[in-house]
Amino acid sequence: MSDLVVRRLLIDLSTPFPSRWNGGDAFRSAFLSALSMSFPVGEQYFMDSVRNGFKTLAPDVQARFAKEVQGFVGQEATHRRIHALFNAHLDTLGYSNEIERRAARRIKANAHRDVRLHVAVTAATEHFTSLFADWMLRHPEALAGAEPRLQTLWQWHSAEESEHRNTAFDIYKSMGGGHTWRLRAFRYVTMTFLCDVMRQTVRNLWHDGSLFKLSTWRSGATMLFAKDGIIRGNVKGWRDYLARDFHPSQHDASMSQQWLIDNAGQFRVVGQNA
């Protein structure tokens, strides 16, 4: 179990930013914007799934997880709100958020399924986001040239994703969730998550007018498929989830912890005095 606190990020998101907000790099901007566009509906789904799963647990088990689930929900709600503000700027720039609409349709179509499956999907997606989050913290160059406030937004989100990486997984296991369905959910999330993000990235690049530029895809190849790129560099972390004895705590979270310590002036813990 983890002690999770809710943090209010002390940055200004009222000021608009340009289409290529990430250091003028078309691909890096479009790819991370695609991720952001998926977050509000995704974060709401994660909160609902974990809360619904938590309600099925025996009272003594609920007592063990109550504070952690409360912290998880609080962090995800804050992520949803912040990225909704970020996405509102993208909307004013004319970007169409198809990834959100597609995810909302998928969630509605599968709402009737067993709550354990929803928690398994949440745990699988949280594994993806924690892998990407750790990569972002290890690769500050991915945000090179972005405004400090936007660098802080992405690094803070990354740190908290790594921090609460255990919660959905532990709720799933406490519900009696099995290995077979955990892997089925993981493979499903692998396919849908990567396809959805890349489709939205392509849409973003088309709108930006940089889809067919060689420099765009040279940057994309480096970010995704370099030796330590987001995809190639996370293959081992992806495979780890397939092991029967896997637990998210097996992955190092020291960079997340250090970032939160080093950047304590960038946020205020909710419930504490400023």
Image (cartoon, grey):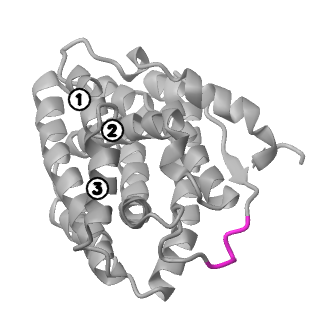
- Indicate whether 82 appears above or below 152: below
Q: Is residue 48 visible?
A: yes
- Give the number of marks: 3
Q: Earlier in the sequence, mark 3 or mark 1?
A: 3
- Pointers 1 and 2 in contact (CB under 8 A)? no
Seen at 55% across and 77% down, the residue is 18
Secondary element under disc 2, as helix, strand or loop, is: loop
- Of the two numbered discs 2 and 3 on the same chain, state the one appearing first in sequence: 3
Q: Is residue 176 above or below residue 221?
A: above
For the residue pair 196 and 24, the one nearer the viewer reads as: 24
Q: Nearer the observer, disc 3 or disc 1?
A: 3
Q: Give the amino acid at mark 2.
A: Gly
For label 1, the residue is 235
Q: Relative to residue 161, is residue 128 drawn left or right? A: left
Q: Magenta part of the protein: which range?
A: 12-16
Residue 14: x and y, percent?
A: 69, 76
Q: The residue tagged with tag 1: helix, strand or loop?
A: helix
Q: Secondary structure at mark 3?
A: helix
Closer to us: 115 or 106: 106
The disc placed on residue 218 is 3
Q: What label does residue 115 carry, if any?
A: none
Q: Is residue 23 magenta?
A: no
Find residue 132 and report its horizontal and vertical position in percent.
39, 40
Q: Main secondary structure of the magenta part?
A: loop
> For residue 229, which numbered disc appears in the image?
2
Dot 1 or dot 2, earlier in sequence: 2
The alpha-carbon separation of the residues under discs 2 and 3 comes to 13 Å
Residue lying at 65% horizontally and 61% vertically, measured from the top left = 147
